[in-house]
Amino acid sequence: MSTARFQPTTTLAAASAACAFSSSVKHHLGFTLRLPRNNSVFRSHSIRRRNLSVFAMSAVSDPLEVCVKASITVPNKLGDCPFCQRVLLTMEEKHLPYDMKLVDLANKPEWFLKLSPEGKVPVVKLEDKWVPDSDVITQSLEEKFPDPQLGTPPEKASVGSKIFSTFIGFLKSKDASDGTEQALLNELSALNDYIKENGPFINGEKVSAADLSLGPKLYHLEIALGHYKKWSVPESLPYVKSYMKAIFSLDSFVKTRALPEDVIAGWRPKVYPAALLREIYW
C-alpha cells in the first residue's frame, strides 16, 4: 500500500501563512509541492519505504482516510477509477485534507478486504465507519461539510447521466452499424443543448456535484475512444467541448486525474476479449 496525505490545492497558499513556523510540516513533508514563489515554508525530504505523506494546516484537524485504485502503470500514483476521482474532486472542492491509500485491485491486501469486504473502491472513513459507494460518500460529505455547497438541484442532477453507459456500449462495439455510436451522440447532443442554455456548468456559473460526477467519465470517454476508436467529440457539439475543457482545467481535476496510460490500460479488457488479449500479449 502507498499512502499520500493531501491538503487541497486551493487552500495551500492561505494555509502556509498560518503555519510558517510549523516544524511538524517540515518534518512530515514527503515530496515537493508546487506553491507560489513567495512561499518558503515547505521543504522536501527523502523518505523511506513506499509511504508518502503530505501535511498542511487546515480547519479540519484530522484528514479523511480514503481508499482508491492504484495505478497499474506507474508506482505510487492514483489509478484510473472515475468514481474514485469523483470522491477526491469533492474533497478538493470542499477544501478537505485527506489521506489517500492506494490499493492494488489486482492483488487486494488483507487489510483492505477487512474494511471493504466486497473489495471495491472508493471507500472513505467517516466517523469511525468505512463508507463505500461514491453516491453515498459524496452525499455524506455534502451533509457533514456543507460549506461550500456542491449539491445539484434534483431537476438538474440527472443531466448527462446516460453518457457513461452509452460510451461503454460504443467502446465495446465491434459493429459500426449497431447504433451504439448514434446512441452516444444523442446523449452528447442533449448535453450540448443543455449547456448552451444553462452553462457553463450543469448548475449554472458554479461547479456542482453533477459536474464532479460527469467530468471523470467524460475524461475516460475522451481518452479511451480516442485510443481505441480514433474517435472524438465532433465539432458540431461545441458546448460539450467547452464544458469538457472547463472541467478538465480545474485545479482539483488536474490534481486528481488518472494518467492517460492508466485509462487506456483500464479499458483494454472491455475492448478485447480474453482470448484476443492472450494473442496480443503472449
Image (cartoon, grey):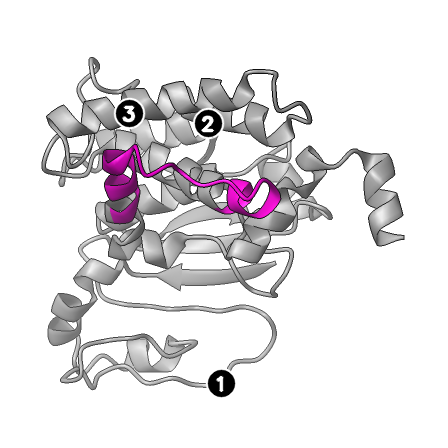
Mark toward the start of the polypeptide (2 vs 1): 1
In depth, the one of 41 and 75 nearer the eye is 75
The residue that mark 2 highlights is: 164
Using the numbered discs, state the Cα–Cα distance from disc 3 to disc 1 in whole angstroms: 47 Å
The residue that mark 1 highlights is: 46
Secondary structure found at label 2 = helix
Mark toward the start of the polypeptide (2 vs 3): 2
Q: Which residues are magenta?
A: 223-245
Q: Residues within 10 Å of mark 1 (few under 14, many from 20)?
A: few
Residue 265 picture location, percent across and down: 64, 49
Q: Is residue 229 magenta?
A: yes
Residue 33 picture location, percent across and down: 32, 75
- Relative horizontal placement of residue 175, taking residue 77 as reference (left or right): right
Using the numbered discs, state the Cα–Cα distance from disc 2 to disc 3 in whole angstroms: 12 Å
In depth, the one of 206 and 9 nearer the eye is 206
Q: Quadrant of the N terminus?
A: bottom right
- Relative horizontal placement of residue 82, taking residue 275 as reference (left or right): left
**To which quarter of the image does residue 228 belong?**
top right
